[in-house]
Amino acid sequence: MNYYSALIKSGKILEGYFEQSKNILHNGSKGTVRENIVNKVIRPFLPACYGLSGGEAFDSEGNTNKQLDLVVYDSVFSYIIPYIDNYIQFPCESIYGNIEIKSFLNKDELMKAIDNIKSMKSLKREGTHSWTVTPLVSIKINGLPDNTDRNPYFGIIFAYDSVEALTVLNYLENLDIPSNLLPNAIVLYSKRTIIFQATDSNIEGFPSNDFNKYVMLNCGEETLAVFIGLLINFTRYSLLWVADVPKEINKALERILNDNIRNKSIKEISVLTNK
């Protein structure tokens, strides 16, 4: 047995859970569907270093994306701003990607999900390279490495139910959106189908901007296993680099100091020290 075969077995157990909860998932609110998928499908399979929460992200240029269903973020090194329960504001440097969760996916819901993913992937952040050891430590020797493509955002749409899979695939044709801003995968659970980014030679199992088509595959009883596997691939591939929060704080302190000097409100005392 290897990890993936064990994952398939777990996927079958989860499918049994979904069948038992079919009425709740079909008729419940989006929040109910989301909670079930997060707690039963995603959270148990991702290490604790990956946080999961709804929220929004922003970049250093002042851009903010639309509200995101389920952000996967670095919960160990990176900075976040807790807002309310299950809603966090993130410096975009802190996030791996987003999962848009739909109880039923039709054209309107698909376009909303694509727009949300586009807004996230449009946020600007400095690229990282393969010698990024942790989000706080990076190595460079004689200017190498010079590649800076190791922190692409990923965007996945997970739909519990949907219109026919081929209909969803056809909706993706001729979208007037740059390829690097499009979803990496669309999981149609009830249809046991996943739509992947692909090239002429292979399916993109890692986050990539180098694709020229979408490919729809019937994954059968392996649908949940493949979905979890994609999450593992996407998060493992990406090497994040923390936002430069100390730089922002120092700028704020300098501004506050200058304001106090200008308003003549600064007070000070001398401190005598023994040397």
Image (cartoon, helix red, strand yellow):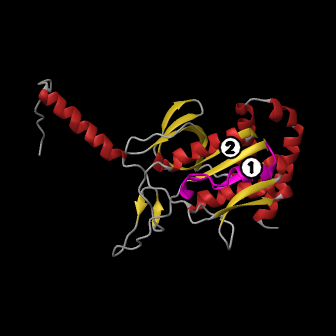
Q: Position of residue 129 (x, y in %)?
A: 46, 66
Q: Position of residue 134 (x, y in %)?
A: 47, 59
Q: Position of residue 244 (x, y in %)?
A: 36, 49
- What's the CA distance linking mark 2 and mark 1? 8 Å
Q: Which of the pair 101/52 is nearer the observer?
A: 101
Determine whether 25 is above or below 237 in the image.
above
Residue 150 in the figure: left or right of residue 52: left
Image-quadrant location for residue 225 = bottom right
Give the crowd class for mark 1: few <14, some 14-19, many >=20 residues within 10 Å: some
Find disc 1 in the rendering and name its residue. 168
Q: Which of the pair 250/143 is nearer the observer?
A: 143
Q: Which of the pair 218/46 is nearer the observer?
A: 218
- Residue found 79% across the figure and 48% down from its top: 189
Q: Given the image, on which type of amino acid does mark 1 rest?
A: Val
Q: Any magenta on residue 33?
A: no
Determine whether 250 is above or below 229 in the image.
above
Residue 110's disc number: 2
> How many labels, in total?
2
Q: Which residues are magenta?
A: 162-186
Decide: marks 2, 1 in contact (CB < 8 A)? Answer: yes
- Residue found 74% across the figure and 32% down from its top: 32
Q: N-terminal of the two: label 2 or label 1?
A: 2
